[in-house]
Image (cartoon, grey):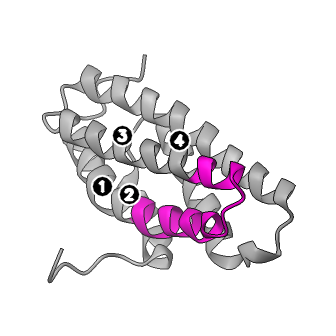
């Protein structure tokens, strides 16, 4: 978006309390994601072996699929009014993960850069905007619901 200044990864990590939703598993997931994104942002992905890169991608995919399912259920449980839009953002990210997995299987060189872009750009933006709004809503509601 033109004119919108996105938070840097470092700023997001420093201000991670603003992402606190009052639901321990989701909060732990966000901390894990920030650690993974931080790791990817510091590593030269071109230096990882194929197995190391596949493990990194698998870790992220496993995290994303499980977390998105849990977050969806929780948004519905607390009556989050923007749940459908938030879920649509998750769907876009899941689609990108699938595309990156396909690129890895086809040994396409852009797969490594695509993972970095997905994690460092798309996920940081998602955490900074959509998840921050969800966290604010949850705090306003007093953390009344828990993930099923």
Circle nearer the viewer, 1 or 4: 4
Image disc number at residue 127: 2
Residue sitting at x 33%, y 50%: 131
Callout in the foreground (2, 3): 3
Residue at mark 4 to residue at mark 2: CA–CA distance: 13 Å
Q: Position of residue 80 (x, y in %)?
A: 19, 32
Label whose residue precedes the other's in the sequence (1 or 3) = 3
Residue at disc 1, secondary structure? helix
Tell me: residue 130, above or below residue 13: above
| Sequence-first disc among 2 and 1 | 2
N-terminal label among 1 and 4: 4
The residue labelled by disc 4 is: 64
Q: Are marks 4 and 2 in contact (CB under 8 Å)?
A: no
Verify CB contact (< 8 Å) between mark 2 and mark 1: yes
| Main SS category, magenta section | helix
Q: CA distance from mark 1 to mark 3?
A: 18 Å
Q: Residue at x 62, y 63 (%)?
A: 111
- The magenta-colored residue range is 100-124
């Amino acid at each position: 978006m033109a004119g919108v200044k996105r938070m840097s990864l470092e700023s997001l990590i420093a201000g991670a309390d603003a992402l606190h939703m009052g639901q321990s598993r989701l909060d732990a997931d966000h901390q894990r994601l920030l650690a993974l994104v931080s790791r990817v942002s510091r590593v030269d992905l071109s230096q990882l072996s194929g197995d190391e890169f596949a493990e990194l991608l698998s870790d992220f995919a496993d995290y994303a699929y499980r977390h998105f399912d849990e977050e969806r259920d929780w948004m519905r449980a607390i009556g989050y009014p923007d749940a459908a839009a938030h879920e649509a953002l998750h769907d876009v990210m899941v689609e990108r993960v699938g595309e990156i997995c396909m690129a890895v299987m086809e040994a396409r060189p852009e797969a490594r850069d695509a993972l970095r872009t997905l994690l460092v750009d798309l996920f940081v933006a998602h955490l900074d905007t959509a998840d921050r709004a969800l966290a604010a809503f949850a705090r306003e509601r007093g953390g009344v619901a828990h993930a099923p």
